[in-house]
Image (cartoon, grey):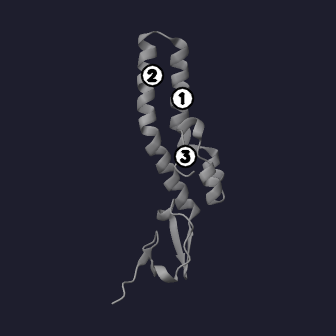
């Protein structure tokens, strides 16, 4: 008895995996959309997945920066406090980056990862 593997897209549609044209990578699998036998990535949904990943990564970075700020506060170091406030602001603003909104392809979206703020990209 042969076992059939199905792929389910973001809308719950399913297709036999052996007959489908599938994107080369699965970074935005949750954004896959089915049209006949071709699976493509829904850019709007991919952007939401991307923003969620940014939020996931920035959480621990914000927590670490809180420690830096508290140490600067205790030392009454105005320069360190200002630098920490700037970094925390950049982390908070990361999901709203214009590069994410203006991306018109999955490749451009992946390139929108701000390594200066968030560190290494999970999409590299």
Q: Which labelled disc corresponds to residue 121?
A: 3
Q: Residue at x 41, y 23 (%)?
A: 67
Sequence order check, earlier mark of 3 and 1? 1
Q: Secondary structure at mark 2?
A: helix
Which of the 4 quarters of the picture holds residue 64? Answer: top left
Mark number displayed over residue 68: 2
Q: Quadrant of the N terminus?
A: bottom left
Work out how far the residue at label 3 is from the one at label 2, CA to CA, in angstroms: 23 Å
Q: Residue furthest front?
A: 1
Name which residue lies at 65% across and 54% down: 108
In percent of width and height, residue 5 lies at 40, 79
Residue 18 on image: x %, y %: 48, 82
Above or below, comparing residue 17 to residue 32 in the picture: below
Query: Dots 1 and 2: beta carbons under 8 Å?
Result: yes
Residue 114 at x, y = what percent? 59, 41
Q: Earlier in the sequence, mark 1 or mark 2?
A: 2
103 lies above or below 60 = below
Report the number of numbered marks.
3
Real-space CA distance between mark 3 and mark 1, rounded to the nearest whole angstrom: 18 Å
Per the image, the residue denoted by label 1 is 87
């Amino acid at each position: 008895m042969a076992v059939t593997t199905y792929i389910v897209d973001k809308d719950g549609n399913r297709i036999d995996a052996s007959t489908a044209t599938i994107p080369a990578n699965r970074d935005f699998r949750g954004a896959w959309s089915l049209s006949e036998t071709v699976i493509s990535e829904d850019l709007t949904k991919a952007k939401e997945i991307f923003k969620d990943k940014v939020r996931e990564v920035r959480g621990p970075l914000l927590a670490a920066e809180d420690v830096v700020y508290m140490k600067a506060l205790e030392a009454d170091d105005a320069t360190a406090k200002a630098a920490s406030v700037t970094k925390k602001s950049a982390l908070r603003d990361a999901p709203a980056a214009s590069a994410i909104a203006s991306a018109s392809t999955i490749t451009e979206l992946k390139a929108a990862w701000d390594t200066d703020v968030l560190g290494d990209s999970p999409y590299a």
